[in-house]
């Protein structure tokens, strides 16, 4: 590793969770996490002043794969929105940059976990293509691709209840804990959206586009939380049995959900979302 740069910045953002983690001598010396869409130039200049110019930036996702998925999904101006080199220069960051695939960045938390060789389950809205992935022995052993997304399911149901997607999921979960499950409604929601499978979270529609259903949060939240937990437990049970491994990490945006932590034996990093990937992408890069 002696050939790797002395000062590395791990970065996430350009849309949400704009964060920076500074590594010096391969140890973390500074962390800045935000929910902002872009990095603040004043903050960047202060980090440079305090910790030195970066020799290398490690970006938390693969812009080329993300661009391909967005183009496939019908997005416009996909190159401009994924031009990381231009973005970094606009923030007065002029060193080289590299990147780590989105779910491999989340997987990087395993290198700072209490386990030597854990099973890692990553679940979020969308990586580049991956929405759920399973890792073991430092490699991805299975994945479920867009649009089959547990995160998009949870966010779209949050919106269907009248709350804000990608913002109010924590409130939605709290409402779930305060209300009883309507089993008939749970069966109805499963028939509308869920493809039955022994472990894979598969969906009948692309929930990235939302849904037209509208149901009060008091009714919908406990049902969706229960389905969410069933989906994660199915993944957990299948792979812990298949690999005979009970040391399990759960990360990605879905790991912010607190209810699932009481149902299965998992270790969750302090910041399992994209902001936390500003740190874990560097661990993946250094251990890749």
Image (cartoon, rainbow, N blue to C red):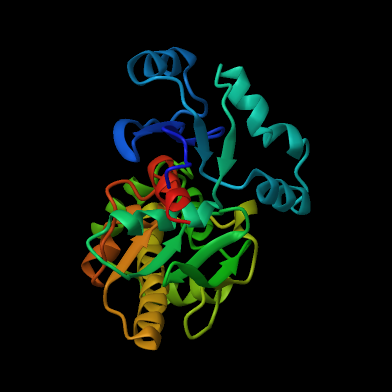
50 or 230: which is nearer to us? 50
Q: Is residue 7 left or right of residue 265?
A: right
The total number of labels drawn is 0
Side (left or right) of 134 relative to 33: right
Q: Position of residue 261 (x, y in %)?
A: 25, 64
| Relative to 171, residue 199 above or below | below
Instruction: Return the residue nearer the eye: 66 or 52.
Output: 52
Q: Is residue 54 visible?
A: yes
Measured from the top left, where is residue 31 in percent x and y?
A: 32, 32
The residue located at (77%, 48%) in the rendering is 71
Residue in view at x 33 percent, y 52 percent: 256
Residue closest to the far front: 2
Where does residue 88 sit, x and y in percent of width and height?
59, 25
Indicate whether 163 appears above or below 261: above
Residue 8 spot, x, y in % from top left: 44, 34
Q: Quadrant of residue 23?
A: top left
Is 38 or 117 nearer to us in this picture?
A: 117
Relative horizontal placement of residue 23, taking residue 191 as reference (left or right): left
Q: Quadrant of residue 219?
A: bottom left
In the image, taking residue 103 as reference, residue 271 lies left or right, namely left
Residue 157 seen anywhere in this rendered image of the structure: no
């Amino acid at each position: 590793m002696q050939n790797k740069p002395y000062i590395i910045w791990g970065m996430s953002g350009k849309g949400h969770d704009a964060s920076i983690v500074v590594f010096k001598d391969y140890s973390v010396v500074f962390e800045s996490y935000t929910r902002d869409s872009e990095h603040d130039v004043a903050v960047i200049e202060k980090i440079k002043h305090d910790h030195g110019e970066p020799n290398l930036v490690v970006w938390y996702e693969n812009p080329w794969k993300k661009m391909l998925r967005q183009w496939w999904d019908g997005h416009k101006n996909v190159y401009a929105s994924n031009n990381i080199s231009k973005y970094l220069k606009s923030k007065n960051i002029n060193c080289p940059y590299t990147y780590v695939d989105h779910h491999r960045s989340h997987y990087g938390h395993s290198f700072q976990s209490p386990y030597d060789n854990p099973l890692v389950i990553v679940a979020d809205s969308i990586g580049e293509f991956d929405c759920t992935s399973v890792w073991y022995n430092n490699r991805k052993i299975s994945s479920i691709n867009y649009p089959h997304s547990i995160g998009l399911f949870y966010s779209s149901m949050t919106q269907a209840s009248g709350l804000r997607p990608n913002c109010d999921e924590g409130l939605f979960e709290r409402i779930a804990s305060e209300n009883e499950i309507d089993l008939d409604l749970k069966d109805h929601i499963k028939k509308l959206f869920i493809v039955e499978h022994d472990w894979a979270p598969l969906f009948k529609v692309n929930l990235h586009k939302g849904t037209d259903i509208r149901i009060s949060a008091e009714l919908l939240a406990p049902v969706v939380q229960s389905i969410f937990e069933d989906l994660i437990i199915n993944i957990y049970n299948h792979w812990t049995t298949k690999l005979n491994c009970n040391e399990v990490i759960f990360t990605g945006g879905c790991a912010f959900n607190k209810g699932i932590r009481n149902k299965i034996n998992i270790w969750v990093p302090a910041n399992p979302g994209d902001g936390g990937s500003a740190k874990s992408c560097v661990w993946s890069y250094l251990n890749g």
